Each structure stands twice: as structure tokens, then as C-alpha cells.
Image (tube, rainbow, N blue to C red):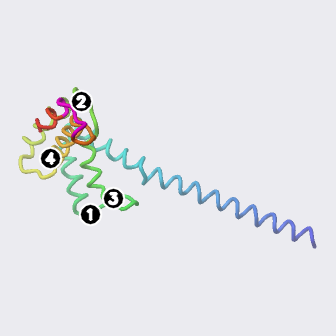
Amino acid sequence: MRNIRMICIALNLMMICLTGFQHASAYDVAVIEDGPIAKEHFKRQVIALYYEDKFSDLEKMASNLRSDKAKFTDGTRKLHHFYQAFAEPRDNEGWKRFFSRSDKWLVKYPESVTAKTAIATAWLAYAWQGRGGGFADKVSEEGWRLSRIV
């Protein structure tokens, strides 16, 4: 009888341990599917559409995100991350390549709120990257020059 009780206790402990591990791995999957990795993946998808000149897809995506008010599990709106994709830091050549495409989008969709907001977000990011994030007394002359261009 004592052996049966010990076996039952051992089996219960094993079940508790296995259940705990299953919850941990389910959590890990959720973090990957809807956490920081998912947000970065989402932004990469947005920028890929931009560089492929798929402006109609960007327009539809933003329109759906606005109407659905879609959010990630942390509560941040997917539309916010849509626009943040255009604010990713680039080197000077990257910014030139980025802005050379922006005119195509505006020509194709001249009344587009999405295009105007995305490009304005990019210009702000460009200005902040040129200025730097320090206090005003720490900004170089070149930093001020770059931020004033915008």
C-alpha cells in the first residue's frame, strides 16, 4: 500500500512538472508570435512593401489597421508600429534611397493620409538622427544643420 502511495505521489509530481514546462513553452511561443520579435517582423514586412513599391498594399494595410484598431498583446496599436517602420535608423545612403521612393507614393496617392504620415515620420526620424539625442548644449553644429533641413 505504501508503495502505491509513493508511486501516486511520484506520478503527481511528474505531472505538475510536465504541466509547468508546457506552460513555459507556450508562453515562449506567445512571446515570439506576439512580442518584440513579432513587432520587428511586422515592421520589416511594412518596409519590404515600401521598397517593392507596393503602395496599394500599404494603403490597404493602414486602412485596415485604422478601422480594426488592431493591437499587439501589450496593448500597443499595430498602426503605431506600421508608422514606426518608416522611422528606423538608416545611414545617409539608406535615407537617400528611402526618400527617392517617397515621391512615387505621393504621386500615386496624392491625397493619402497614410503616405503623408509615413513620410513625415521618416523626416522626423531623419532630423532626430542628424541632431542626436543629447541635450541642446551637446548638439554639434552639423547636428543642428541636419535637423534644420527638415
| Numbered disc in front, either 2 or 1 | 2
Between marks 2 and 4, how big is the CA–CA gap? 18 Å
- Find disc 2 in the rendering and name its residue: 94
Q: Residues within 10 Å of mark 4 (few under 14, many from 20)?
A: many
| Numbered disc in front, either 2 or 4 | 2
- Find disc 1 in the rendering and name its residue: 68
Q: Residues within 10 Å of mark 3 (few under 14, many from 20)?
A: few
Q: Main secondary structure of the magenta part?
A: helix
Q: Residue at position x 31%, y 45% from top?
A: 43
> Under tag 4, what secondary structure?
helix
**Given contact means CB atoms under 8 Å apart, are the residues at marks 2 and 1 in contact?**
no
**Which residue type carries mark 2?**
Gly
Is residue 102 shown above or below 65?
above
- Find disc 3 in the rendering and name its residue: 76
N-terminal label among 3 and 2: 3
N-terminal label among 3 and 1: 1
Is residue 30 shown above or below 146?
below
Between marks 2 and 1, how big is the CA–CA gap? 32 Å
Which quadrant holds residue 21? bottom right
- Find disc 4 in the rendering and name its residue: 115
Between marks 3 and 2, how big is the CA–CA gap? 27 Å
Q: Residues within 10 Å of mark 1 (few under 14, many from 20)?
A: few
Question: Magenta region: which residues?
Answer: 137-143
**Which residue type carries mark 3?**
Thr
**Given contact means CB atoms under 8 Å apart, are the residues at marks 3 and 2 in contact?**
no
> Under tag 3, what secondary structure?
loop
Residue 112: percent from left, percent from top: 11, 50
| Numbered disc in front, either 4 or 3 | 3
> Under tag 2, what secondary structure?
helix
Q: Which of the two residues, 137 or 110, is positioned nearer the viewer here?
A: 137
Between marks 3 and 1, how big is the CA–CA gap? 13 Å
